[in-house]
Image (cartoon, rainbow, N blue to C red):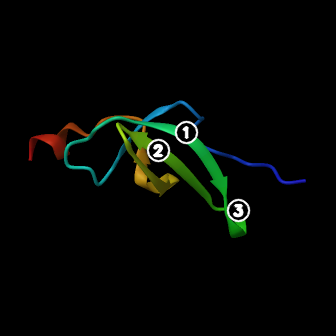
Amino acid sequence: MMVIKNKYEITAIVFLKTDKDQLPRIITAIKVCKEGELLYEVVQGTFQSNHYEFELDAERNIITVTT
């Protein structure tokens, strides 16, 4: 049996660490990949993308927005 230890839940609002605008995104799916890696499917408006957990943050980075 596989146990998945995900940091974020589906429907959680997250921010991409590399997004200079720090737009909120909603998690719509969690994909389990080889070696147990997790990919989070996130949506912002009409745009969908997939990201690893280390690319996401639950808090908006105001330093990124102001620079």
Indicate whether 23 appears above or below 50: above
What residue is rendered at 42% in x and 54% in y? Answer: 55
- Where is residue 6, by image quadrant? top right
Looking at the rendered structure, the kind of residue marked 1 is: Thr
Q: Measure the C-alpha gap from mark 3 to mark 1.
A: 19 Å
Q: Position of residue 59 (x, y in %)?
A: 36, 34
Q: Residues within 10 Å of mark 2 (few under 14, many from 20)?
A: many
Observer-nearest of 18 and 28? 28
Q: Which residue is mark 1?
A: 28
Q: Residues within 10 Å of mark 1 (few under 14, many from 20)?
A: some
SS type, badge 1: strand
SS type, badge 2: strand
Q: Earlier in the sequence, mark 3 or mark 1?
A: 1
Q: Measure the C-alpha gap from mark 2 to mark 3.
A: 19 Å
Q: Measure the C-alpha gap from mark 2 to mark 1.
A: 6 Å
Q: Position of residue 63 (x, y in %)?
A: 17, 42
Contact (Cβ within 8 Å) of mark 2 with mark 1? yes
Tell me, for residue 42, which label it has, or none: 2
Residue 18 left/right relative to 2: left
What residue is rendered at 52% in x and 48% in y? Answer: 41
Q: Which residue is mark 3?
A: 36
